[in-house]
Image (cartoon, rainbow, N blue to C red):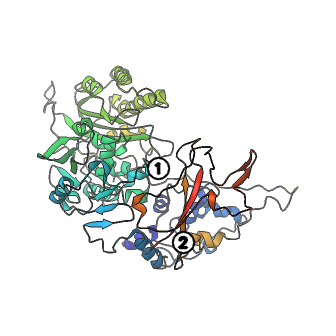
Amino acid sequence: AALAGAEGKGSGPPPREGFSRLTSADAERAVVGNLCRCTGYRPIADACKSFAADVDLEDLGLNSFWKKGDAHVDKLPPYKEGSIGAFPEFLKAEIIASLRVDKCMSATVMVGSESSWHRPRSVEEYYRLIASDSFDGSGTKVVAGNTSSGVYREAEVYDRYIDLRDIPELNSVSKDSEGVQIGAATSISRVIEILRREGDDCKDVIFGKIADHMEKVSSYYVRNTATLGGNLVMAQRDEFPSDIATILLAAGSSVCIQVSSGKLNVTLDEFLEMPPCDYKALLLSISLPRCTPENVSSSAGAVNMTGDKTESSLLFETYRAAPRPLGNAVAYLNCAFFAQISSDESSGSLILEKLHLAFGAFGTRHAIRARDVEKYLVGKPISASVLLEACNVLKKSIVPKEGTTHSAYRSSLAVAFLFTFLYPMTKRNVKPARSARLNGHAASDTNGNPNCPPSADIDLSLKETNGVKSGLHSNDHILESCKQIVEIGKDYLPVGIPAKKVGAELQASGEAVYVDDIPSPEGCLYGAFVYSTKPLAHVNSIELDPSLEQLKTVAVITVKDIPKGGVNFGANTIFGPEPLFGDPLTQCAGEPLGIVVWLLL
């Protein structure tokens, strides 16, 4: 998919022969989160990067199989545009048939094997649906991408699902001079594209930074499905440690909610403080305000005490600490800071006019604003003593709830990130700029945008203040360069010589055929174990759930079906033989009681 996407971006000079338009950074981002216990992550990333024209052959792990000096481009398999393997059509048809879902997805109600699936086409239709007599809120789940099922393992099978993706109002995007309004059902990947496009004029302070941070949320393929609204609802209702909620809170975002009485516009801070939302409250859209010096008012006045004009500048920075920098890793702490600062030309000191300090994922119900710290800092010139006192105030605000793991570490992270953000402002020779948009991986004063020339308004001294953070959160290079050297002793040759697995080419090329790739033959039978839900229980009988009546059950095999002379034997362990079926008393919860065999029509 990444190779196909790179081909679609056909602008610019063509790549050298045998390579794709994919960059090494794009290849690494495409496979982030694909961990493999036997192969390891780096070999997978190296194999994918070998398609990229900008790859450094010395950085590929392939050189461990070549003798010194033999690494050259001809050793890599050539790449041809348009030769990408697609998902097999027979597998698409089989999956669609097994789900009993029409290919065009045009039906408002689709009935599956166990649950009904509803797709309202408007907000009004949604509320008519939940108000109907047949609606039972306890057995209903409202979804968009339904990626929350990967976070919260739900044992419950819902009677009906309501999919919000066909409601136009939840997919709309509108822009004006005040900001951008994004529908709640918009995927996170599309939100990133929208913010990058809006920030390409190099005037907005925060849109590019928010997009950068969103790329650290989950993995690429999850972001393609997960929605912006779903992420915020999880943070509000399920206490999900959302990075997105934290950075949008610092940016001063607001949300629009549809309730029975009508639409309600509230700040994100107020939304997170509300009681947990249920199906009666529908999140419609999220509004992100533009942050440029032109549309952010100054509270410090236009002149200082001596009559000199003051300059105002906007700073925005995001941070996160997690077991892994990218991919499916919940943060120990995430935070985002927005500041409007002014410079007193006579004294050279910096004064905070406006400040948003948002912290999340540290063991609290949702992301919060450190308002005590904000109140202490606003209006004060930033000095070392003021910064020290602000850190002391913050320690009292960021207190993880009881039972939170690594609580002391999370609190210390909050102080460290605040110090990193404010410390450069204590340098008296720093003068803020009017419209500098600072970014952790900005290149050549262009904020990472090759089409945007350096702004004449950017003050070099201000960029120096952000130098502490520069590069810490760069998404351009996920893996550091490496050189793999395999030292082989001669004592036990040929043991130790790198050897290639027989099926390596088949598996790496995607041509290996696995059982799941083989179409099911006609009349194929399916089976599933029936497990005990209680330990030390007598098994009286096994009855199927009424919802499974539509399945053509062939047989229910239990201990009674073992032929005469056979033994109820399942496995032989170091503790002795274990029975295949629990009889007459179950030993533990989860012990097999029987096997249901059915024919899928």
Dot 2 lies on which element?
strand
- Indicate left or right for 100 with 285 as reference: right
Residue labelled with disc 1:
328
Q: Earlier in the sequence, mark 1 or mark 2?
A: 1
Q: Position of residue 125 (x, y in %)?
A: 17, 60
Q: On the rendered image, what quadrant is the N terminus found in?
A: bottom left
Along the viewing direction, whichever of 374 and 399 lies nearer the viewer: 399
State the mark number for residue 525. Answer: 2
State the mark number for residue 339. Answer: none
Q: How far apart are marks 1 and 2 (CA)?
A: 36 Å
Q: How crowded is mark 2: few (under 14 residues within 10 Å), some or many (20 or more)?
A: few
Q: Position of residue 117 (x, y in %)?
A: 31, 62
Along the viewing direction, whichever of 522 and 219 lies nearer the viewer: 522
Dot 1 lies on which element?
loop
Identify the residue at the far right of this view.
491
- In this rendering, the answer to whether 540 lies above or below 411 is below
**How many marks overall?**
2
Mark yes or no: residue 14 visible.
Answer: no
- Indicate left or right for 394 with 185 as reference: right
- Indicate left or right for 507 with 207 as reference: right
Q: On the rendered image, what quadrant is the C terminus found in?
A: bottom left
**Three-letter amino acid code at disc 2?**
Leu
Q: Looking at the rendering, which quadrant does residue 569 occupy?
A: bottom right
- In this rendering, the answer to whether 422 lies above or below 30 is above
Mark yes or no: residue 306 visible.
Answer: yes
Q: Residues within 10 Å of mark 1 (few under 14, many from 20)?
A: some
